[in-house]
Image: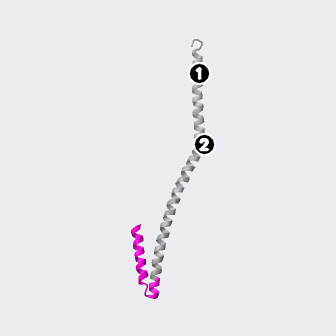
């Protein structure tokens, strides 16, 4: 400790502070370069969730359309032939089952 002067201590502190500032600046640069990737990853994840919800809604809509079309077919068949009572009953039961499951 005898050979160390106040100026050398001060120079060492300044060098340590400069190293700390350099590391902080390097971290800022790395973080800035990574930010678009993180934002893009988050946006893609959100779009995936939206697509999954849309696919689920589309599946539900297709099921509802199938029930409606079978009921419409039963009504048309009954109107044409006049004796499609059993088809109408099945169609009614199917609509009732569908609506109670929703």
Q: In x, y percent, where is residue 43?
A: 55, 52
Sequence order check: which comes first, mark 2 or mark 1?
1
- Left/right placement of residue 99 relative to residue 8 reads left
- Magenta residues, start to end: 76-102
The answer for how far apart the CA atoms under marks 2 and 1 are is 32 Å
User: Does the magenta segment cover residue 77?
Assistant: yes
User: Does the magenta segment cover residue 86?
Assistant: yes
Q: Residue at x 58, y 25 (%)?
A: 16
Which residue, given by chain and number where applicable, does mark 2 sit on?
A: 33
Looking at the rendered structure, the secondary structure element under dot 2 is helix
Give the colour scheme shown.
Answer: one colour
How packed mark 2 is, by other alpha carbons closer than 10 Å (few <14, some 14-19, many 20 or more), is few
Report the front residue among 58 and 14.
58
Q: Is residue 15 above or below residue 81?
A: above
Q: In x, y percent, where is residue 56?
A: 49, 63
What is the count of numbered marks?
Answer: 2
- Left/right placement of residue 87 relative to residue 32 reads left
The image quadrant where one finds the N terminus is top right
Report the front residue among 44 and 56.
56
**Looking at the rendered structure, which numbered label has been put on residue 12?**
1
Q: Are marks 2 and 1 in contact (CB under 8 Å)?
A: no
Q: In x, y percent, where is residue 7?
A: 59, 17
Report the front residue among 74 and 31.
74
């Amino acid at each position: 400790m005898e050979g160390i002067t106040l100026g050398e201590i001060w120079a060492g502190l300044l060098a340590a502070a400069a190293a700390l500032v350099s590391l902080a600046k390097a971290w800022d640069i790395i973080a800035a370069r990574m930010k678009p990737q993180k934002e893009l990853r988050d946006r893609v994840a959100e779009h995936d969730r939206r697509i999954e919800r849309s696919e689920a809604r589309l599946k539900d809509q297709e099921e509802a359309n199938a029930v409606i079309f079978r009921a419409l077919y039963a009504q048309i068949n009954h109107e044409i032939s006049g004796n499609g009572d059993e088809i109408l009953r099945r169609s009614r039961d199917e609509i009732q089952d569908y609506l109670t499951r929703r």
